[in-house]
Image (tube, grey):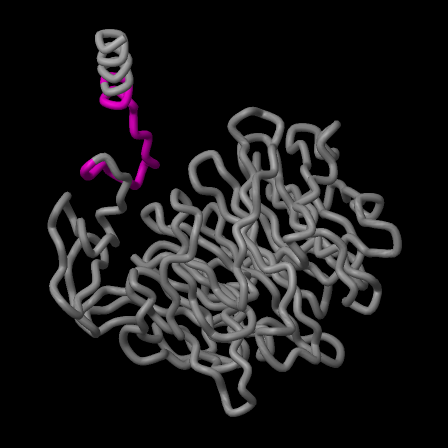
Amino acid sequence: MTVRLASLLLASTLAACTTEVVCTTAQVTCNGQCVSPSSDPLNCGACGRACGSGESCSAGLCCQGSQCPPAVYAACFNGSAVQGATAAVTPVGAPVPVDSGPISVAWSGTSLWVANSISNTLDRMKVSPAGLAPDGSFPTVSIPVSGFFSDLEFLAEWNGLLHVSNAAVGSLVLIDPAALQPIVAEVDLGAGSFPQGIAFSGGKAYVALNGLNQVAVVDLATRKVTKTIDLSALASPGKAALPSRLLAAGSRIYVTLWNLDPSFSAPGHGLLAVIDATSDTLAPLVNPLDLGSACLDPGGLALHDDTLWVTCGFFPYTAASAADISGASFVPVALAAGAPIVGTAVPATGFAPGAITFCNGVGYVGDRFSGNVLRFDPSARKVTAQGLVCAPTSTGSSFVADVICGK
């Protein structure tokens, strides 16, 4: 019996010794654990290289306060500014004022462009040794306003051009950053379309038409709408699909659906639409992807390795505190197996996660309610830090409209 027990113990020990630790592409193995050397203060730049008291790890360097390079930038909608933050989500440098209502940011080369919803303008910024700064006078580009209000919603770069969804007009505006007359084209998306997110695949732009419950397919060579994909049947009974953000992965386009009633309240489960980009039709057998009761009003999505992460969190217009937020979570959707598989939601109690991006294997998420930026570890599947990056205004509101990795 003793010999047999010893053999079993030896076998289990050998099995444990040969267990493979699989890390993401941005991580390394330190003492059998996956860590991100670009941002882990205990393994900053290399295993075992710990930062000192009061220091954080940014870009693989131990630094303190204003000496740290921003790992991420946040668009502070209410404060009309862009604010940098370290990997520990501590604000670094002063907020840089931009035009009214920054809603979306995108890199074009070494320039950081900001789309401002309320002023209907684009501002160009540059990274200097002193930090982020305006590149010339603002606004850099003014997009003509038509009607009673202005409402830019999303900004994306593709093939050297900036693409802006102009919700007030119902159009996709194409900007050449290098041209003297930067507005080079405007694609009509239809009255009442209220375009939002944009994704690119195979020479086409896919634009979420929030007002029509459709996705428009735009041929970027001809700059014409070649097709619209109706998503209205994917909504729950009594709800509207309300597509918002898109992401291209492989030959598919994933689209978040708010799934709200006509008064933009009483949310159903958060949903994902899946579009086959080769045929520009809804992918068979998978639509819609139900993100579950723990996900209401999905606000953003980003890809980390083979997992699509969707942020969720609903609050009514009358919300007075974080207690009014429901269905707040991070939902993983595994894409490696071909057919997407919805995983277990990670609770985000007290927050309303929105825009999300991954920088060197670490997730950064803008909160739509509090002005915080959350640091999210996709391997541990938890929020590891939070920082008040967008300070509340006199009204008490603070919407982190977008986040983007630093350069």
Task: Give the residues in magenta.
Answer: 14-31
Q: Is residue 186 visible?
A: no
Residue 127, placed above or below residue 98:
above
Q: Position of residue 74 (x, y in %)?
A: 42, 68
Residue 227: image quadrant is top right
Q: Position of residue 133 (x, y in %)?
A: 31, 74
Point 42% across, 63% down: residue: 374
**Quadrant of the snapshot with the C terminus:** bottom left
Question: Most extreme residue toward the bottom, as rendered?
Answer: 394
Residue 21: image quadrant is top left
Point 82% across, 48% down: residue: 232
In the image, residue 23 lies in the stretch drawn in magenta:
yes
Q: Position of residue 55 (x, y in %)?
A: 17, 66
Residue 38, placed above or below residue 178:
above
Left or right, 42 with reference to 325? left
Please name whichever residue, 290 or 25, is drawn nearer the observer in this view of the structure: 290
Point 70% across, 76% down: residue: 317
Question: Most extreme residue toward the front, as rendered?
Answer: 1
In the image, residue 165 lies in the stretch drawn in magenta:
no
Residue 249, placed above or below residue 353:
above
Point 71% across, 70% down: residue: 168
Q: Position of residue 166 (x, y in %)?
A: 65, 65
Please name whichever residue, 34 or 244, is drawn nearer the observer in this view of the structure: 34
- Which secondary structure class fits the magenta region best? loop
Left or right, 119 with reference to 14? right
Please name whichever residue, 54 or 142, is drawn nearer the observer in this view of the structure: 54
Total marks in image: 0
